[in-house]
Image (spheres, coloured by chain):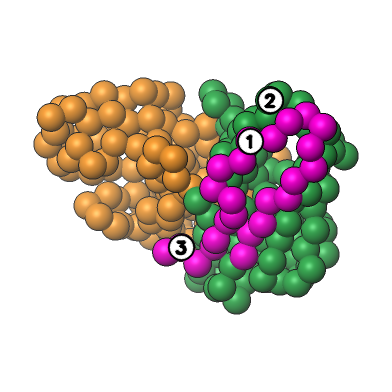
Amino acid sequence: ETGVTQTPRHLVMGMTNKKSLKCEQHLGHNAMYWYKQSAKKPLELMFVYNFKEQTENNSVPSRFSPECPNSSHLFLHLHTLQPEDSALYLCASSQDRPTNPEAFFGQGTRLTVV
Amino acid sequence: GDSVTQMEGPVTLSEEACLTINCTYTATGYPSLFWYVQYPGEGLQLLLKATKADDKGSNKGFEATYRKETTSFHLEKGSVQVSDSAVYFCALVTDSWGKFQFGAGTQVVVTP
């Protein structure tokens, strides 16, 4: 149990579908992140939220829409995705503490776009 | 900008062999350094960390020392097990609000 929970673990969706990924953290952290992990590619930071405010959007296509209603929950809304969007999507959280700056990750959602 | 470079894999070892994965970094300011491990089908788990120069992080027989003079944070284990087979990521953070930089990952395969 890492303290960061992602649902669903696996998702298969068509290119015209709309779906959402959910992330929840019980660690009292103030920052939350979405990462994309594709085969043979480095981890890609997609979005960063600090105190519910989006502070980073790494040129992510608009078919990915994040939502952070509070410091414990983070969503990634998906619509009209492409097959190349198939990947493992990882959520993480962290806290601004000099002695404990590490991020904690969820187990990820394996997304397949067909 | 900040970046992390780690050795490419896969690294294939026999059980009880010694493991070293090299990691070097470039960063402005004073980064904290991490090693994460990812088992198949799982997310990243923090393996160890060091938050200032000369600190040694250790966990589960793995060690890494924060070397500011060589900007390195090499991961070592003296005797690996089959269960150590995974992908290992070196990472750093300098910003207060966690803009983490990850290396590309090194796959380690340990055979019986």
Residue wearing tag 3: A2
Magenta residues span A1-24
Q: Which amino acid does label 3 sit on?
A: Thr
Chain A colour is green
Can residue A87 be seen by looking at this rendering? yes
Q: Which mark is residue A12?
A: 1
Q: Kindly indicate which chain is depicted in orange in the rendered structure.
A: B
| Crowd rating for badge 2 (residues with CA inside 10 Å; few <14, some 14–19, many 20+) | some
**Mark 2: amino acid:** Val
Of the pair A64 and A18, the residue shown nearer to us: A18
Q: Do the residues labelled 3 and 2 touch (CB within 8 Å)?
A: no
Chain letter, disc 3 residue: A
Between B85 and B24, the one lying in front of the other is: B85
> For residue A65: magenta?
no
Secondary structure type for disc 2 = loop
Q: Are marks 1 and 2 in contact (CB under 8 Å)?
A: yes
In whole angstroms, how far apart are the C-alphas of marks 1 and 2? 7 Å
State the image quarter where residue B53 is shown: bottom left
Q: In which quarter of the image is residue B80?
A: top left
